[in-house]
Image: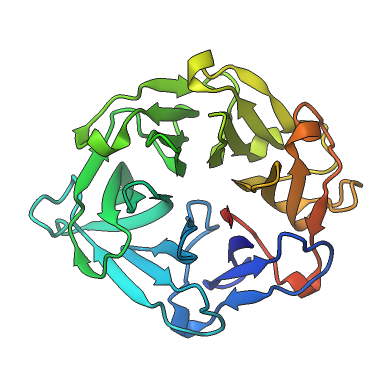
């Protein structure tokens, strides 16, 4: 199944829609979590929305403000989350509560199947100064109620976190935007607590606004970058994370505003795009694309194997993706 979280272009609602990996064209979701009871609300453009999944249980996780919402495998419709965890304790609030004038805003989120932990990128916002600091809070995926992170990862290199991923070896990848645009890799993330410097900085001369991230079994890094009209692909750590190529590019008539990426088990990459062209004519509509990795890398306008688009899909502004 392919899961997409989607902030509405109008109002403050969001929803989670799922489609079969065989879906193509103007098709209705097989499952859609939406409505007032879900707690899925969002401010602004939803650029920092996150969606994580436990592939073993098919649970879905997302952050709304300081609340972690968990949905069980079969939940659909206007249904309440199976559990809600509230986070207020991070690096900026060691006593467990934020100082007056500060708010906690959780965003990108990743599940680590090895540890069973969630990595949550959070902005600690000074509302009076209109400034923010960023941290990554680590909590067990089964958390509920008021939660204190087991680890809090900070870095002087965090400027604005737009995406996060954990690979099969427990390394942490962070899409970093703001004064610098890059992907920061932290090796052995489970050992980190407190201030940390990245093991590697990826794509500093290539990326413009890195967002969604995925890491394949070879260790290659896939980064959605809307200003590049592309998914940018880097080699693995042993090769020094070299630029391999792009799926899309400045002249692409297919990709328009890629935001989320996810890899499937059959050699495909799924891309959420708020302004893609399902027909390849450059006319932008919300689309979930699937491309074959064996042919798409290095192609400005690759032909998708699947393109889910149209009124029946309910897609408006698809952001993060999960596939399992």
Residue in front for this viewpoint, 194 or 19: 19
Image position of 275 with respect to 230: above or below: below
Q: Is residue 176 visible?
A: yes
Residue in front for this viewpoint, 238 or 249: 238
In the image: residue 219, left or right of residue 274: left
In the image: residue 164, left or right of residue 224: left
Q: How many numbered marks are there?
A: 0
Q: Position of residue 108 (x, y in %)?
A: 44, 50
Image position of 152 with respect to 199: above or below: below
Q: Position of residue 198 (x, y in %)?
A: 34, 25
Residue drawn at the location 20% of the way across and 50% of the way down: 90
Residue drawn at the location 35% of the way across and 65% of the way down: 68
In the rendered view of the protein, which quadrant contains the C terminus? bottom right
Query: Which of the 4 quarters of the picture holds residue 197?
Result: top left
Image position of 182 with respect to 227: above or below: above
Query: Which of the 4 quarters of the picture holds residue 211?
Result: top right
Q: How is the image coloured?
A: rainbow
Residue drawn at the location 43% of the way across and 62% of the way down: 62
Query: Which of the 4 quarters of the picture holds residue 286?
Result: bottom right
Q: Is residue 127 visible?
A: no
Residue drawn at the location 69% of the way across and 66% of the way down: 19
In the image: residue 178, left or right of residue 18: left
Residue in front for this viewpoint, 226 or 114: 114
In the image: residue 195, left or right of residue 220: left
In the rendered view of the protein, which quadrant contains the N terminus? bottom right
Q: Position of residue 146 (x, y in %)?
A: 19, 68
Q: Position of residue 9 (x, y in %)?
A: 63, 66
């Amino acid at each position: 199944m392919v899961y997409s979280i989607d902030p509405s272009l109008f109002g403050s609602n969001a929803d989670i829609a799922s489609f079969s990996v065989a879906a193509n064209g103007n098709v209705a979701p097989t499952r859609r979590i939406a409505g007032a009871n879900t707690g899925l609300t969002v401010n602004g453009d939803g650029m920092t929305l996150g969606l994580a999944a436990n592939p073993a249980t098919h649970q879905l996780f997302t952050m709304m403000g300081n609340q972690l919402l968990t949905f069980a495998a079969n939940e659909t419709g206007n249904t309440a989350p199976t559990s809600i965890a509230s986070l207020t304790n991070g690096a900026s609030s060691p006593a467990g509560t934020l100082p007056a004038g500060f708010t906690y805003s959780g965003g990108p989120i990743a599940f680590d199947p090895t540890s069973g932990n969630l990595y949550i990128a959070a902005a600690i916002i000074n509302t009076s100064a209109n400034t923010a600091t960023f941290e990554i809070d680590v909590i067990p995926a089964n958390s509920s109620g008021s939660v204190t992170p087991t680890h809090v990862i900070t870095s002087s290199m965090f400027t604005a976190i737009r995406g996060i991923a954990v690979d099969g070896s427990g390394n942490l990848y962070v899409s970093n935007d703001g004064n610098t645009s890059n992907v920061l890799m932290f090796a052995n993330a489970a050992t980190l607590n407190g201030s940390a410097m990245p093991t590697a900085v990826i794509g500093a001369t290539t990326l413009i606004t890195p967002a969604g991230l995925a890491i394949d079994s070879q260790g290659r890094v896939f980064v959605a970058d809307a200003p590049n009209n592309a998914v940018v692909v880097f080699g693995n750590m042993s090769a020094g994370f070299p630029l391999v190529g792009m799926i899309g590019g400045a002249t692409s008539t297919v990709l328009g505003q890629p935001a989320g990426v996810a890899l499937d088990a059959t050699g495909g990459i799924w891309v959420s795009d708020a302004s893609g062209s399902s027909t390849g004519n450059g006319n932008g509509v919300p689309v979930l694309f699937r491309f074959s990795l064996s042919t798409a890398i290095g192609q400005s306008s690759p032909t998708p194997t699947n393109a889910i688009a149209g009124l029946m899909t309910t897609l408006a502004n698809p952001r993060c993706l999960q596939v399992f």
